[in-house]
């Protein structure tokens, strides 16, 4: 069963997808919405030519936070995953970074993946705070041809640019 926080995260991610997925990031209203993500997190908006997917994830996770959650804000996915791995190793914190080979994602989790032609693994992520990567929020679990599939929502899903997509 999902917590209220997870339900809010998933609902927000799906709502953002449903509202903005038909627009390119240079188009209004998505461009203005991306600027809102930055502004709400207290980060200067650099424009949409800068990958903004980490800001999208940070915004979704933080806009729904109660006093019991502490998701790090960052323009880089690698930063919050490195923190999550450190939390796991110290048995502390609300956000825990698991190796995808050790833990099956649940609804509300964030899956991090390589961006571009990188092949960074969990060990690399544990020892490096800044590297190119991508992540998205799990909004649904399903199966395709008997294989478990996580349906995710993330920002600029088209290799650096693009809409909010699922």
Image: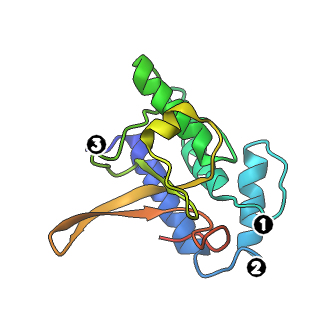
Secondary structure under the numbered disc 2 in the rendered image: loop
Q: For the point 72% across and 64% down, which residue is it?
A: 33
Residue 20 is situated, as x and y percent measured from the top left of the image, at 61, 73
Q: Give whichever of discs 1 and 3 has the lower sequence position.
A: 1
Q: List the single residue furthest toward the left.
A: 146
Farthest residue to the bottom: give it.
22
Q: CA distance from mark 2 to mark 1?
A: 10 Å
Q: Point out the tag, 2 or 1, that comes first from the N-terminus.
A: 2
Horizontal side of residue 120 vs 4, given as left or right: right
Name the image quarter holding the N terminus: top left
Residue 103's disc number: 3
**Between residues 87 and 10, which one lies in front from this camera angle?**
87
Residue 40, image x, y percentages: 74, 47
Q: Residue at x 31, y 49 (%)?
A: 106
- The residue under label 2 is 27
Foreground label between 2 and 1: 1
Q: Which mark is residue 48?
A: 1
Q: Is residue 71 visible?
A: yes
Q: Secondary structure at mark 3?
A: loop
Q: Nearer the viewer, mark 2 or mark 3?
A: 3
């Amino acid at each position: 069963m999902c917590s209220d926080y997870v339900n809010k995260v998933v609902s927000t991610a799906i709502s953002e997808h449903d509202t903005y997925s038909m627009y390119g990031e240079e188009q209004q209203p998505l461009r203005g919405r991306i600027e809102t993500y930055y502004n709400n997190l207290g980060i200067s908006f650099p424009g949409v030519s800068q990958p903004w997917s980490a800001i999208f994830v940070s915004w979704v996770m933080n806009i729904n936070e109660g006093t019991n959650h502490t998701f790090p804000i960052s323009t880089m996915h690698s930063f919050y995953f490195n923190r999550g791995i450190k939390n796991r190793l110290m048995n502390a914190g609300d956000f825990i970074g698991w190796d995808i080979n050790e833990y099956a994602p649940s609804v509300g989790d964030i899956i991090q993946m390589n961006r571009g032609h990188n092949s960074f693994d969990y060990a690399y992520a544990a020892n490096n705070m800044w590297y190119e990567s991508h992540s998205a929020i799990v909004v649904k679990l399903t199966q395709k041809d008997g294989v478990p599939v996580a349906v995710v929502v993330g920002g600029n899903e088209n290799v650096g640019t693009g809409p909010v997509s699922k």
